[in-house]
Image: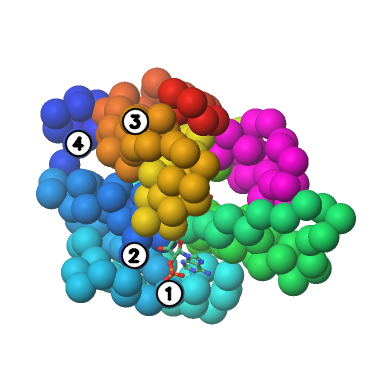
Amino acid sequence: MSKSVETAEGYKNKVIIVTGATRGIGYAIAKDLEKENIVISIGRKKHKEKTPGIFIRCDITNRKDVELTIQTIIKEFRKIDVLINCAGIMLYNDLIKATEEEFDRSFAVNVKGTFLMCREVLPHMRKQKEGYIINISSVRGITAAPNKGIYSATKYAVRALTETIFLENKGYNIKATSVCPGIIWTDSTKEKLKMEGLTKKDVLLEEDIVKTIKYLLSLSQKAHIREIVIGGRLHG
Ligand SMILES: NC(=O)c1ccc[n+]([C@@H]2O[C@H](COP(=O)([O-])OP(=O)(O)OC[C@H]3O[C@@H](n4cnc5c(N)ncnc54)[C@H](OP(=O)(O)O)[C@@H]3O)[C@@H](O)[C@H]2O)c1
């Protein structure tokens, strides 16, 4: 294992895939990591003028898209050190009102998309005998809440996938962590949070998640945090 993986200040020149990197948390993570690494940002479309690192358009719910994306990355860079699965959708509704379409879309992106990305990347990490997969779950993946039953179910599932990845790949020096944040102030959430009377001071900020990811990446390959739960001051 290279020394750079083992030191916080030396986590550099790694090939890191970040899904959902066109906005929100994924964008913030990719933007920070691109300073010292080769970052591949994945999303369906660009939302900002400049997406961090190298942008690959990919719908993570589409098997062929995912296969082609990983093939392209391997052809170009020969390895994948880290996969950060951040793409997700947050559809909230009471179970009694929720539609099948909401259910199917939520599971397609949050669970199937995460599964497809992991399944495609893992054989390469196994060959390398090293790798790290970080899946963004949620505090709703730890406890359910009214109005968020389907979202919550997808995030419990993400934790199950993460745990399985670790257990099935122990012999290959592959780590997997679920990151479970409470509500975060992003472009997608801020209007709703303001309506609830909350301010930036009350909830997590994107930078809190970025720092958490960098902390995880700074640990040695044998120091394995399976799960990390981060709550804001008044929420989550
Ligand atoms: N925000 C929070 O308060 C919060 C709290 C806890 C956990 N989380 C989790 O953190 C993650 C990111 O949240 P966020 O607030 O940053 O979300 P966001 O701003 O809505 O961004 C979601 C990202 O996922 C991508 N995406 C969605 N469907 C996709 C698909 N089929 N294929 C490829 N990319 C897709 C989007 O790209 P396109 O628009 O191009 O599709 C976008 O880049 C999610 O998994 C969410 O569940 C968020």
Q: Position of residue 23 (x, y in %)?
A: 35, 61
The label shown at residue 11 is 4
Do the CB atoms of the residues marked 1 and 2 lie less than 8 Å apart?
A: yes
Q: Along the line of sight, which residue is nearer the eye, 159 or 66?
A: 159
Position of residue 177 measured from the top left corner of the image (x, y, whole percent): 49, 34
Task: Give the dominant element type of the magenta stretch: helix, strand or loop.
Answer: helix
Q: Can residue 35 be seen in this view?
A: yes
Q: In this view, does 14 lie to the left or right of 136?
A: left
**Of circles 3 and 1, which is in front?**
3
Number of the label disc, if any, that sits on residue 201: 3
Q: Does the residue labelled 2 lie within 8 Å of ligand 1?
A: yes
Q: Earlier in the sequence, mark 2 or mark 3?
A: 2
Q: Which amino acid does label 2 sit on?
A: Thr
Mark 3 vs mark 1: which is more N-terminal?
A: 1
Judge: label 1 CB < 8 Å from ligand 1: yes
* Between marks 2 and 3 in the image, the one whose residue lies nearer the viewer: 3
The amino acid marked with disc number 4 is: Tyr
Would you identify the image quadrant in which residue 63 lies? bottom right
Could you tell which of marks 1 and 2 lies nearer the N-terminus?
2
